Image: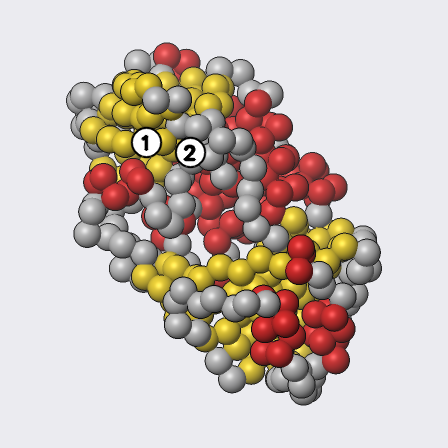
């Protein structure tokens, strides 16, 4: 069957899903993206794209747009809570820029670039409010996959030559295929914020402290993203999240306290961190492939979640 006759359904319209839609459309597939939320978008604050992530967006043809939406910086290293250097990377030297350069990105702007590319790709259909409820994986060399989803109280069933599960760490598709594989709490929760009207400072710097980590980098000329990651039982409730964050990192390096002082309650979000330390036995079964966090959700301190999702999307298209 020729590629132009093939159809794919992508479950999930986040970074991984949109990137997959772009990659598959470029390969000549008809693509339908099913997003459970009522609108396409990205929840979250910032992220850092390393060299492999930028290579992936270049391969998708959106590298220039991603660079325009982000902020070029570098990794400086790691400090202790008092601000003393534990590991300090030397200033940029000849041949080193390709390794140390990172791009600070606001998640919503990175997603917007991919969304625009997907909407402009021939043969793509993007559907919101669509909750996948059943999956029949089919056979790689035989029957097509079949996807059932609910939208506006109606049930829809469609066949697909390929189903891409890009629906996150709590993937509905993965649950259908591998119900024993469940996300595990990583032991930490994380505050995050993009603070407006705070010019990007120096290179990306992280602080390592007892049971906690704090880091920051620019995501534009006038915005700084920071995260505060700390060990805590799951399901924590703080009556005043901002006060709790400032208290947790009180006494840490002055630059970290300054960022917290300039953060407002409206800037702040917090999420418990879940991952898949024991993932599915395979990322591909029948005509279904799992990608991104649905396949291999990692802890955010690895700094590779978005980059690996983009790489997965490239591989799906190819």
Circle 1 is placed at which residue position? 132
Number of on-image labels: 2
What's the residue at 63%, 35% (across, down)? Answer: 113
- Which colour style is shown? secondary structure
Mark 2–mark 1 distance (CA, rounded to whole Å): 8 Å
Q: Residues within 10 Å of mark 1 (few under 14, many from 20)?
A: many
Judging depth in this view, the residue of 116 and 127 nearest the camera is 127
Considering only vertical position in the picture, is 132 above or below 249? above
Q: Position of residue 74 (x, y in %)?
A: 70, 63
What's the residue at 52%, 40% (across, down)? Answer: 15
Q: Position of residue 277 (x, y in %)?
A: 32, 62
Q: Residues within 10 Å of mark 2 (few under 14, many from 20)?
A: many
The answer to whether residue 24 is seen in the rendering is no
Circles 2, 1 touching at the beta carbon (< 8 Å): yes
What's the residue at 25%, 43% (across, down)? Answer: 175
Q: Which mark is residue 275?
A: none
Considering only vertical position in the picture, is 245 above or below 86? above
Q: Quadrant of the C terminus?
A: top left
What's the residue at 63%, 72% (across, down)? Answer: 243
Disc nearer the start of the sequence (2/1): 2
Judging depth in this view, the residue of 225 and 318 nearest the camera is 225
Circle 2 is placed at which residue position? 36
Q: Position of residue 38 (x, y in %)?
A: 49, 31
Left or right? Give the position of 280 relative to 108: left
Considering only vertical position in the picture, is 83 above or below 94? below
């Amino acid at each position: 069957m020729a590629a132009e006759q093939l159809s794919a359904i992508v479950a999930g319209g986040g970074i991984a899903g949109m990137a997959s839609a772009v990659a598959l459309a470029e390969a000549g597939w008809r693509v339908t993206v099913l997003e459970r939320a009522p609108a396409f978008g990205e929840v979250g604050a910032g992220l850092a794209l390393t060299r492999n992530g930028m290579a992936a967006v270049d391969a998708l043809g959106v590298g220039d747009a991603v660079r325009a939406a982000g902020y070029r910086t570098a990794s400086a290293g790691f400090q202790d809570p008092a601000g003393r250097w534990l590991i300090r990377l030397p200033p940029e030297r000849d041949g080193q820029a390709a390794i140390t350069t990172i791009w600070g990105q606001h998640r919503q702007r990175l997603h917007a670039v991919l969304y625009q590319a997907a909407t402009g790709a021939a043969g793509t259909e993007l559907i919101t409010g669509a909750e996948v409820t059943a999956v029949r994986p089919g056979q790689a060399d035989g029957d097509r996959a079949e996807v059932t989803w609910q939208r506006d109280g109606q049930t829809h069933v469609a066949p697909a030559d390929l189903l891409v599960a890009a629906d996150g760490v709590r993937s509905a598709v993965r649950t259908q295929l591998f119900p024993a594989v469940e996300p595990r709490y990583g032991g930490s929760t994380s505050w995050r914020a993009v603070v407006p009207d705070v010019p990007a400072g120096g290179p990306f710097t992280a602080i390592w402290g007892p049971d906690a980590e704090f880091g920051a980098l620019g995501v534009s000329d006038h915005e700084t993203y920071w995260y505060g990651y700390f060990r805590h039982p799951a399901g924590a409730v703080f009556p005043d999240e901002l006060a709790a964050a400032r208290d947790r990192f009180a006494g840490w390096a002055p630059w970290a306290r300054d960022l917290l002082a300039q953060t407002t309650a409206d800037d702040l979000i917090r999420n418990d961190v879940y991952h898949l330390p024991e993932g599915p036995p395979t990322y591909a079964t029948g005509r279904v492939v799992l990608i991104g966090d649905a396949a291999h959700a990692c802890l955010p301190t690895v700094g590779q979640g978005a980059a690996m999702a983009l790489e997965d999307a490239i591989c799906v298209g190819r």
